[in-house]
Image (tube, rainbow, N blue to C red):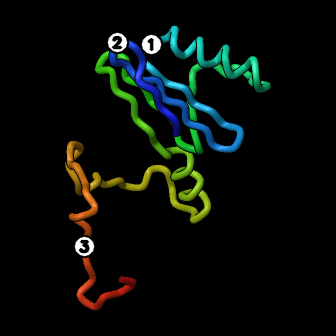
Amino acid sequence: MHYNKLPGGAYIYLLLYVDDMLITSKSRSAIDKLKKDLSSKFEMKELGEAKKVLGMEIERDWKSSKVSLTQKGYLKKVLQKFNIDDDTKSVSTPLTPHSNLKATMSCRSPRGGGE
C-alpha cells in the first residue's frame, strides 16, 4: 500500500497486489492524474468501479458514506463444500460493531501455548 497526502489535506491510496490495483481518494482529479501517470509507464486496463479486491466483495452505502468488505462469496463456497444449506440459522458476531481491537487485548494462554 502506498499513500500520499494531497494539497488540501485529502489522501490518495494505492493498493497493489501482484497484478491487481485499487486506487481510492476523495479527489477524483487526483485519481485520474495518478491513473494517467501510471498508464504512461505501465500497461493498464480500466475495469471501472471496484466490486472485489483480493477475494473480498466491496459494498458501498453512499447515503451514509460507508464502505464494507465482506467474504460472502467465499463463505458460500465453504458452506457448499461441507454440504451446509444456505437456510441454516446464522448468529451474530459476539462483538459490537464499533469495538476497537488492540494487540494488548489479546488473550494469553495460561499454558504458554505458542508463546
Q: Would you place residue 24 above or below residue 52 in this image?
A: above
**Quarter the C terminus occupies:** bottom left
Image point (34%, 12%), residue name: 8
Seen at 57% across and 20% down, the residue is 49
The CA distance from mark 3 to mark 2 is: 42 Å
Amino acid on which disc 1 is placed? Ser
Residue type at mark 3 is: Cys
Report which residue position mark 3 lands on.
Answer: 107
The x, y position of residue 40, in whole percent, is: 75, 17
Earlier residue among tags 1 and 3: 1
Tell me the SS state at disc 2.
Answer: loop
Q: Mark 2 points at which residue?
A: 8
Q: Is residue 6 left or right of residue 19?
A: left
Q: In this view, does 65 lie to the left or right of 73?
A: left
Q: Distance between the residues labelled 2 and 1?
A: 10 Å
- Residue at image position (51%, 55%) is 85
Q: Do the residues labelled 3 and 2 touch (CB within 8 Å)?
A: no
Residue at image point 45% right, 13% down: 27
Between 18 and 62, the one nearer to me in the picture: 18
Q: Would residue 7 be found to the left or right of residue 48 on screen? A: left
* Mark sitting on residue 102: none
Distance from disc 1 to disc 3, alpha carbons, whole Å, reads 41 Å
Circles 2, 1 touching at the beta carbon (< 8 Å): yes
Q: Name the N-terminal-most of marks 2 and 1.
A: 2
Callout in the foreground (3, 2): 2
Please tell me the numbered disc located at residue 27.
Answer: 1
Where on the picture, by quarter, is residue 105?
bottom left
Please tell me how many numbered marks the rendered image carries. Answer: 3
